[in-house]
Amino acid sequence: MRSRKFLQAEQATLMWDTPGLIAGVDEAGRGPLAGPVVAAAVILDELNPIAGLADSKKLTAARREKLYDEIRAKALCCSIAEASVEEIDTLNILQATLLAMRRAVEGLRLKPAKVLVDGNRLPVLDVLAEAIVKGDATVPAISAASILAKVHRDRWCAEYDREFPQYGFAAHKGYGTAEHLAALRAHGACPQHRKTFAPVTEVLR
């Protein structure tokens, strides 16, 4: 007898056009050494299209901010969720990312008939889901989700830059740049650093 979880995973590989609402899901912040991983889910309104949606990494910060507001205003519904630094260190970054994605989908005001997720891994959901590699560049709802997640995390970095200015979070967004690594060596880790990530682990020894 196959478990329910197994059946959900198997169902996710089936591909057909599903009538009903479609949600796009993407994440931001898997690679940085600090801060939460953020996921967003968006159900767009076909009658109220948004021009210029694209992979958030291909857009300027100013353009992302403008689209962030437009998505929040025009989408049928959207949801942004996080998995914390503690959850990342406990679960690992992949499982924490899938957890944030699941929280984002579950936070939608409307329940989608199908969820399209950027990448090649799926969170466990109670609706049909499909993973789409490079979906943030090809599926508007995923592009919208990537923008919401990226802006939300960038704002987190700006906030914590004010609390911990010695690390330069606003500039490098938590990634392991030379400047960030130098700050880690000089000041040690702050509470928002991911202790299981190698450069942070090194300074904690």
Image (cartoon, rainbow, N blue to C red):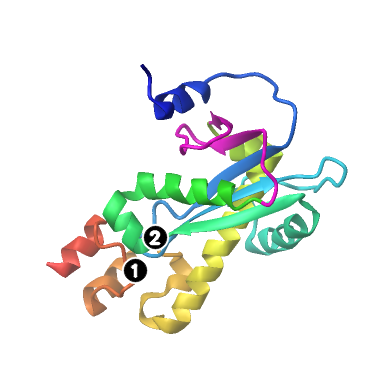
| Residue drawn 88% across the image and 42% down it | 47
Query: In the rendered structure, are the residues bearing label 2 and label 1 in contact, judged by CB atoms less than 8 Å apart?
Result: yes
| Residue drawn 80% across the image and 48% down it | 50
Q: Is residue 128 left or right of residue 200?
A: right
Where is mark 2, residue-wise?
A: 175
Pinpoint residue 22: horizontal percent, then vertical percent: 69, 36
Q: Write down the region rendered in magenta.
A: 109-132
- In the picture, which quadrant includes the N terminus? top left
**Amino acid on which disc 2 is placed:** Tyr
The label shown at residue 198 is none
Pinpoint residue 177: horizontal percent, then vertical percent: 36, 62
The answer to which quarter of the image holds residue 195 is: bottom left
Badge 2 element:
loop
Q: Is residue 188 above or below residue 42?
A: below
User: Which residue lies most toward the left here?
Assistant: 205
Pinpoint residue 2: horizontal percent, then vertical percent: 38, 19
**Amino acid on which disc 1 is placed:** His
The answer to which quarter of the image holds residue 73 is: bottom right
Q: Give the Cα distance between marks 2 and 1.
A: 7 Å
Pinpoint residue 138: horizontal percent, then vertical percent: 66, 34
Badge 1 element:
helix
User: Which residue lies most toward the right here?
Assistant: 47
Where is mark 1, residue-wise?
A: 180
- In the picture, which quadrant includes the C terminus? bottom left
